[in-house]
Image (spheres, rainbow, N blue to C red):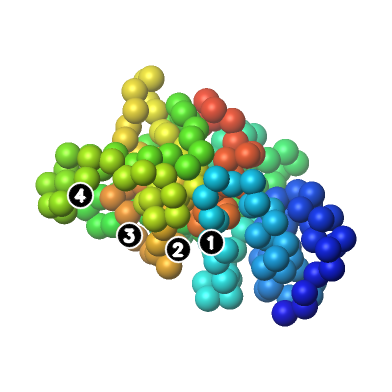
Amino acid sequence: MTILSKGKQIRAAFLPLGLLLLAACSTRSETGPSLEQLKLAYANEPYEVRIVNREKFDARFRPTIVPAPQGMPVGSILVDTRERFLYLVEEGGKARRYGVAVGASGHAWSGTATIGRKAKWPGWHPTDDMRNETPGLPQRIEPGPHNPLGARALYLYQDGRDTLYRIHGTSEPWTIGTEASSGCIRMLNEDVIDLYDRVASGAMVRVI
């Protein structure tokens, strides 16, 4: 891997994060951002964002721009649990698509909600059901690289009440593209940071 000069590293730190992520969709090559550039993009995060080697994932789960799903307003999110895709609808009939992990059999959730809250590096409070299924789970897991919610969380509400379902990062990146969660929508930390910065509180989220 080519080592960047100091001047190039400084300029890379100011590249828009979304451009870095989309450029990384092909490979970590000379035409895309290097590992050093990506690390610089997250230099101000309070915890380490562990960069994922996307070449180890199915290429269809890399972030990309696609035609927007029909019937979804600009700024809204559609999650297709069958295909394992999350779409953020943008202007011009386009959408930003990310690969996700969805609920395991018996835990899947669908419906329409709004983003009632957004949080950076949230703590995780397992539900009573989770603690019953997994004895020994603590009441709370502190923020950080090993927290199951990862770097960001979008809390889904219905009628002003927390559904207990979230769109969030993950400490288990290998689960992306699978049925693995307890109903929440998991994203790579790099992707959920990008989504977090683009979507507004109050935005509609439809999970199908």
* Foreground label between 2 and 1: 1
The CA span between labels 1 and 3 is 20 Å
- Of 188 and 94, nearer the camera is 188
The CA span between labels 3 and 2 is 11 Å
User: Label 2 neighbourhood size at 10 Å, few (<14), some (14-19), many (20+)?
Assistant: many
Q: Amino acid at mark 2?
A: Pro
Q: According to the image, label 4 marks what residue?
A: 137
Quadrant housing the N terminus: bottom right
- Indicate the position of residue 147 as horizontal and vertical percent values: 38, 51
Asked if labels 1 and 2 touch by Cβ distance under 8 angstroms, the answer is yes
**Which numbered marker is on residue 130?**
none
Q: Does residue 72 appear left or right of residue 112 in this picture?
A: right
Q: Is residue 70 above or below residue 102?
A: above
* Foreground label between 1 and 3: 1
Q: Earlier in the sequence, mark 1 or mark 3?
A: 1
User: Label 3 neighbourhood size at 10 Å, few (<14), some (14-19), many (20+)?
Assistant: some
Callout 3 secondary element: strand
Q: Amino acid at mark 4?
A: Leu
Q: According to the image, label 3 marks what residue?
A: 180
Q: Is residue 115 above or below residue 193?
A: above
Q: According to the image, label 2 marks what residue?
A: 173
- Indicate the position of residue 125 as horizontal and vertical percent values: 29, 39
